[in-house]
Every structure is written in C-alpha cells, then in structure tokens.
Image (tube, grey):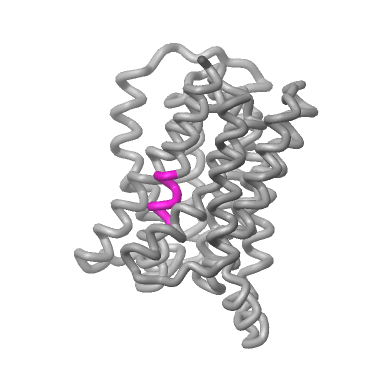
Amino acid sequence: MALEIGILFAIITMLSWGTADIFAKKAIDKIGYKTSLLLNHAIALGPLIILAVLFFKPPPLSLELVLITFSAGILGIIAYIFLYRGFQKGNVSIVSPISASWSVITTVLAVFLFQETLTSLQIIGIIAVFIGIFFASTNFAELKKSIKEGRSSGISDGLISMFAWGITYTLLRPLAIAFGPIIALFFIRIIAITLLFSWTKSTKTKISRPIRLIFLFIMAAGLLDLLGFIAFNFSISTAFLSIVGPVAATYPAVTIVLAYFFLKEKIVNNQKLGLIAILTGLALISLA
C-alpha cells in the first residue's frame, strides 16, 4: 500500500514539474533566468509559509540534521541556477533530459546509503524508465542541429544541475522523514531564497515587475513547482527513493506531450518510443 501511495505522489510530482517547465521557459525567454528564478521562489514562499504553520510541529534537532538541511538548501539552489541558466543558454530538449537524469544518481545513492532493496521486476522497470526519459525528452534532430550551430553550451549547465539535484533529492529523504514533508521543504526553501536574494544582490541583478502575462507564467511555474516538491517529499517518505525517484524524473516527457498539444510542437519517433518505455516501466514498478 505504501508503494502505491508513493508512486501516486511521484506521478503528481511528474505532472507538476513537467507542466511548470513550460511556463518557466516562457518566462526565462522574456525576462532572463535570474529574475524568473527569484520571482518563482518568492511567489511560492507565501503558500509554503501557510502550509508550514498549519502542519508545524517541533522538529527533532541534531547537528547531523542541521548540516543535511543546509547542504540540501545550498545544493538545491545551485541546481536551480544552472538548470534555469541552461534553459536560457541552450535548447530545452537538450538541457532538460540531462538535468532529469538526476534519478540515476539518487537510485544509486539510495541503494548504498539507505540499503534499499529492489525486486528484479522493479529493476527492469526502473531501467525502462531511465531509457524512456532519455528518448522521450530528446529530439535528436534538434540536438544535432544545436551542436552543429554551436548552441550546445547548455549541456555543461545541465550536467551540473543533474549532479546537484541527485545529491539534493537524496538528502531530502531523511529530512522528510524527520521533519515531515512540508516542514522539511520549508526549511530548505528559506535557505534557498536567502541565498537567491544574496546572489542577485551581489551580481547587481535588476529585478523589475514583468508584464501581466509573464507574471502569470512565473506564478504558475512557481506554484506547480511547489506542488511537485511537496508531492515528492510525501513520496520519498512513504516509499523507496530508488523507485519513486525515477517515476518523478519522467517529467520531461510530460513537457513534451503538453508542448505537442498546446504549442503544436512535433513529437518525433524516438520520443514516442520513449513514452512507451516510460509507461511500460511504470507498469512494471507498480505491479512489483
């Protein structure tokens, strides 16, 4: 039962993050990644504070948990910065699948650090999801074109984001269990937004109010991102990180599908095969 609930929350994460990326990309293209990122976090902070007050309970404090919290907050904002910068510098179809490969790192770390054991069927399902993420979220024609035209600079940002996310999401599991999913996220976001304000101030970033439509895009991205994180924290507190992590990381496939329906972007054959692999992997994980 816990596995089914964990997968359900991971699917909510997948849908939320996949939709948020569409809105975030539109805002980044208009006002830049620094302003988009800061407004994204600032908008989401209000609802998070309300939830933290409603679900607050005295957290268990120890030096280890404090260090993990600060590490997760710092690495999390680093992951955000390089992800958003990658979106601005490169092609989303290149940066997004690289960043989403964080699930490989979390799965390996979860098995070694948390002694999570997987059945053969679950391992096959996870491998299918990994393959599906790559193929579903990568347009090889665009990738080849971007590299040929010298627009592949976002790759390094995607790689840094991938490693930072992989460690961040691993650290989130003990925090979600110790503090609860919402309070753990609240502590991390407070650290993150403090660092964001300091960073934008030190880099002398000019923050101006965007036009109404772009502000709505940022608001949608921020709230969906927040929903995704809350659902993710619930998923990793009820099921193995090595299972729900790959499920949540399929969000680039959601972005591709939404772009097809709402932005009229074409889905190439390898992306269709990737979507089939993802659905097959999810089925195998659920059946196990």
Vertical relation: 212 (above or below) 249: below
Tell me if 68 is positioned left or right of 50 in this view: right
In the picture as drawn, the residue positioned furthest to the left comes out as 212
In the picture as drawn, the residue positioned furthest to the bottom comes out as 149
Residue 136 point in image, percent of width and height = 56, 58
Q: Nearer the viewer, residue 249 or 175?
A: 249
* Residue 174 within the segment the image draws in magenta: no
Image quadrant occupied by the C terminus: top right
In the picture as drawn, the residue positioned furthest to the right comes out as 112
Quadrant in the picture for residue 46: top left
Residue 236 point in image, percent of width and height = 56, 27
Quadrant in the picture for residue 45: top left
Magenta part, dominant SS: helix
Residue stretch in magenta: 15-21
Identified at 53% across, 17% down, the residue is 2
Residue 78 appearing in the image: no
Identified at 68% across, 59% down, the residue is 159
Vertical relation: 203 (above or below) 223: below
Identified at 58% across, 58% down, the residue is 273
Q: Nearer the viewer, residue 278 or 226?
A: 278
Vertical relation: 11 (above or below) 20: above
